[in-house]
Image: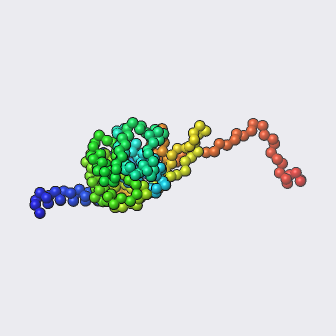
Amino acid sequence: MSGARGSALAILRGQIERIETAEVVHQQGRVALGHSEADSALKGGLARAAIHEVFCEGRQGAAATGFVMGLAGRVSARRPLLWVRQDFSEVETGALSMSGLAELGLDPRRVVMVRAADVESALRTSADALACDALGAVVLELWGETRQFDLVASRKLTLASQSSGVTGLLLRMAAQPLPSTAETRWMLRAAHSPPGAMWSAWGAPRFDAELLRNRHGPCGRWIMEWNCDECQFSEPSTYPQPVAATSAHRPDPAVPWQRRTA
């Protein structure tokens, strides 16, 4: 083996080792999600310049999409967001709604949609996008089990993210988690929304978010509520039921039965 080739191989092995042993220090820091318990487990928030995976069952795709939109809104810091998805995803789950983004409090004008013909194209586009430091975040949406997304592909995305500082979010619907270099891994389910105001058709979005993998802290499971006005997650708010006011003129209290008989 030539010296140059051996040196390049040694450098690549060193990069992979730093990823797998979680020794990479993210200079870009972390962004708080707003949910105190989740942020505590994440050592202050979601790490930038890293890859994060969000899994869900097929029927939970809408909830997982909303959760990823919330994460992307937090980490993108008002910079453009690139969303890469397969054509097949649109057949299974439908097109993304720009009005839905606006309902979540996010600006749809900052979102650039890319429809890829196949998994290879989606992976290649995402890797190129993650290397562009003009973006705030890149979302890669893949449907079902894909043999193309293996540990090697995951490492490529992670290296691109670390070199540019752009955060990558992988939305995996109807797929089983496999070994990867992701910083965190989530399993998403829909949670019951609280009753909304009289003029609202629904309450605030709520997510049953389970943190399955966390390289720098413990895992956990929380109900996270999305605040559309502040564009951040929070603990579930309480909505006490209204109680009727006490009447101003009440009759005298009833005389106990024992006193009446006496």
Residue that lies at the very extreme toward the right in this rendered image? 262
Which color scheme is applied?
Answer: rainbow
Residue that appears at 29% across and 50% down: 124
Do we see residue 219 in this rendering?
no
Do we see residue 152 in this rendering?
yes
Residue 34 image position (x, y, % from top left): 44, 45
Residue 73 image position (x, y, % from top left): 40, 42
Asked whether, in this view, residue 4 is left or right of residue 260, the answer is left
Question: How many numbered marks have been drawn onto this rendered protein structure?
Answer: 0
Residue that lies at the very extreme toward the bottom in this rendered image? 1
Residue 148 image position (x, y, % from top left): 32, 58
Residue that appears at 43% across and 50% down: 91
Asked whether, in this view, residue 108 is left or right of residue 244, the answer is left
Quadrant placement of the N terminus: bottom left
Asked whether, in this view, residue 195 is left or right of residue 102, the answer is right
* Quadrant hosting residue 145: bottom left
Residue that appears at 54% across and 46% down: 237
Looking at the image, which is closer to me, 259 or 206?
206
Residue that appears at 31% across and 41% down: 135
Looking at the image, which is closer to me, 58 or 106?
58
Residue 68 image position (x, y, % from top left): 42, 48
* Quadrant hosting residue 106: top left
* Quadrant hosting residue 28: top left
Looking at the image, which is closer to me, 145 or 156?
145
